[in-house]
Amino acid sequence: MKFDVLTIFPQIFSAKDGYLNQSIIKRAQEKKLVQVKAHDIRKFSKDRHKKVDDRPFGGGAGMVLLFEPIARAVQKVRIRNQESRIKNGAKAKKTRTILFSTRGKKFTNKEAKRLAKYDQLVLICGRYEGVDERVVKTVADEEISIGDYVLTGGELAAMVVIDSVSRQIPGVLGKKESLEEEQGSYPTYTRPEIIELKVKSKKGKEEKTKGKKLIVPKVLLSGNHKEISKWREKFGNK
């Protein structure tokens, strides 16, 4: 799976200590199961000052990202990847271009599974007051929203999609059982079995210490896997 991210802040995705260069996603890239590449939209501007935005027609606050640099960037990354595949004797990539937008389809785990079936995702990160509507109509295959709130830009949304979709790719997590949706979401515990909390309270000048024990449910210590499964199903999201 290749993720091509179009942004005016590519350094967010390439930072050595950044999110995508840590833990599971880092290992997935090292094993060549996924590839993440950020492309600077400014490099696709023909303006001598590398301008990528302008004032909106009809007035209003903020600036709007221009159509041309985004359209050129999408065309370039899609064609470049297809040519590379064909040159190496492989089939053309199954590609999907996504624009992050508050008007988009809500991103869910079901959507992550659907998108994991593609070979390449081109992720367009909007900024300011958004992008020229003609990007929506002629460049993007779909719009996606990661929630009912507004972000400064689409970069965080892109990372959410990269992380969630990558988890669906065989080998990224090591074991299929690691997928939370496969087992349901339920309370989990680890050692020690008993944690003692001591809370100090004052009554006038006198200080008292009250003890409270946090104990692991007995069924999880029983070794009875059938009963443990029943307990997890009771609390899980299945």
Image: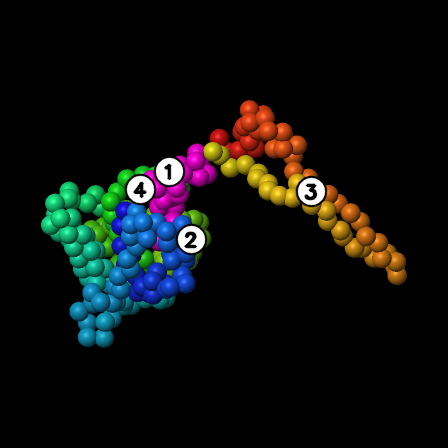
Q: Which residue is mark 2?
A: 23
Q: Which residue is mark 1?
A: 110
Tell me residue 41's x, y (percent): 25, 64
Mark closest to the chain's N terminus, 4 or 3: 4
- Seen at 65% across and 44% down, the residue is 192
Kind of residue sitting beneath label 4? Ala
Q: Are marks 4 and 3 in contact (CB under 8 Å)?
A: no
> Distance from label 4 to label 3 (Cα)?
41 Å
For marks 4 and 3, give the one nearer the viewer. 3
- Distance (Cα) linking label 1 and label 2: 24 Å
Of tags 3 and 1, which is closer to the observer? 3
From mark 2 to mark 4, how far is it between C-alphas?
20 Å
Residue corresponding to mark 3: 194
Residues at badges 4 and 1 in contact (C-beta under 8 Å)?
no
Residue farthest toward the bottom in the current orientation of the protein: 49
The residue singled out by tag 4 in the image is 116
Three-letter amino acid code at the position of disc 1? Lys
Mark 2 secondary-structure assignment: helix
Element carrying mark 3: strand
> Does the stretch in magenta take in 172?
yes
In the rendered structure, are the residues bearing label 2 and label 3 in contact, judged by CB atoms less than 8 Å apart? Answer: no
Q: Would you call the spot at circle 1 few (<14 residues within 10 Å), some (14-19), or many (20 or more)?
A: few
User: Which of the two discs, 2 and 3, labels the residue nearer the N terminus?
Assistant: 2
Q: Dot 2, how many residues are within 10 Å of its Cα: few (below 14), some (14-19), or many (20+)?
A: few
Viewer-closest of 32 and 101: 32
- First in sequence: mark 3 or mark 1? 1
Q: Amino acid at mark 3?
A: Ile
- Tell which of 162 and 171 is nearer to you: 171
